[in-house]
């Protein structure tokens, strides 16, 4: 297993088959850095934190506010889900025993009468969150 670690440059350069490298973390040896067989106590270097590309999604409560502004009156079947979305920030949040993703899916199922350009835009935004 080869990963980003620090190595002691040749531990024993006088070996008949070439230099021996040693991992500074676990002490494993090998004839090349790629050939070092690390011990189970030697954890791989964690990957660097990578920010997701593109803009961050809007919070669900902001989307819910926009839906209320553009859909009047809100269909009675969609009201409980829109109310729940108004209390959520992200698609990974929980609302009672439900997760935000199921709340959004149930809202979309009950928002068939929400029509128009704003409706298409807002529904598309919700669908990208659950995709």
Image (cartoon, rainbow, N blue to C red):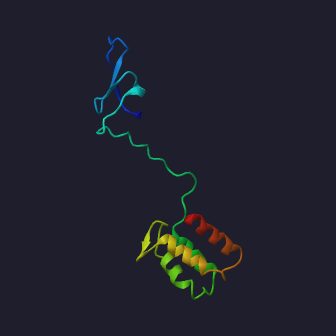
At horizontal 57% and vertical 83% (from top left) the residue drawn is: 78
Compared to residue 77, the image places residue 4 above or below, namely: above
Q: How many numbered discs, if any?
A: 0
Residue 23 percent across, percent down from the top left: 32, 29
Q: Quadrant of residue 113?
A: bottom right
Q: Quadrant of residue 94?
A: bottom left
At horizontal 59% and vertical 76% (from top left) the residue drawn is: 108
- Closer-to-camera residue (120/130): 130
Residue 126 percent across, percent down from the top left: 58, 69
If the image is split into quadrants, where does the C terminus sit? bottom right
At horizontal 63% and vertical 82% (from top left) the residue drawn is: 71
Residue 111 shown left or right of residue 24 in the figure? right
Residue 22 shown left or right of residue 129 in the figure? left
Compared to residue 83, the image places residue 62 above or below, namely: above
Residue lying furthest front in this view? 17
Q: Quadrant of residue 107?
A: bottom right
- Closer-to-camera residue (47/84): 47
Residue 33 percent across, percent down from the top left: 40, 26
Compared to residue 37, the image places residue 49 above or below, namely: below
Residue 40 shown left or right of residue 67 in the figure? left
Residue lying furthest right in this view? 116
Residue 101 percent across, percent down from the top left: 51, 70
Compared to residue 82, the image places residue 28 above or below, namely: above
- Closer-to-camera residue (41/104): 41
If the image is split into quadrants, where does the N terminus sit? top left
């Amino acid at each position: 297993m080869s990963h980003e670690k620090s190595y002691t440059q040749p531990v024993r350069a006088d070996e008949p088959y070439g230099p021996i490298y040693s991992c500074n973390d676990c002490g494993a040896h090998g004839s090349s850095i790629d050939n070092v067989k690390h011990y189970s106590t030697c954890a791989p270097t964690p990957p660097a934190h990578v920010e997701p590309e593109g803009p961050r999604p809007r919070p669900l409560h902001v989307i819910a506010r926009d839906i209320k502004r553009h859909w009047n009156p809100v269909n009675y079947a969609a009201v409980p889900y829109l109310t729940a979305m108004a209390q959520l920030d992200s698609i990974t949040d929980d609302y009672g025993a439900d997760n935000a993703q199921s709340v959004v899916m149930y809202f979309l199922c009950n928002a068939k009468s929400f029509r128009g350009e704003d409706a298409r835009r807002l529904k598309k935004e919700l669908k990208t969150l659950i995709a």
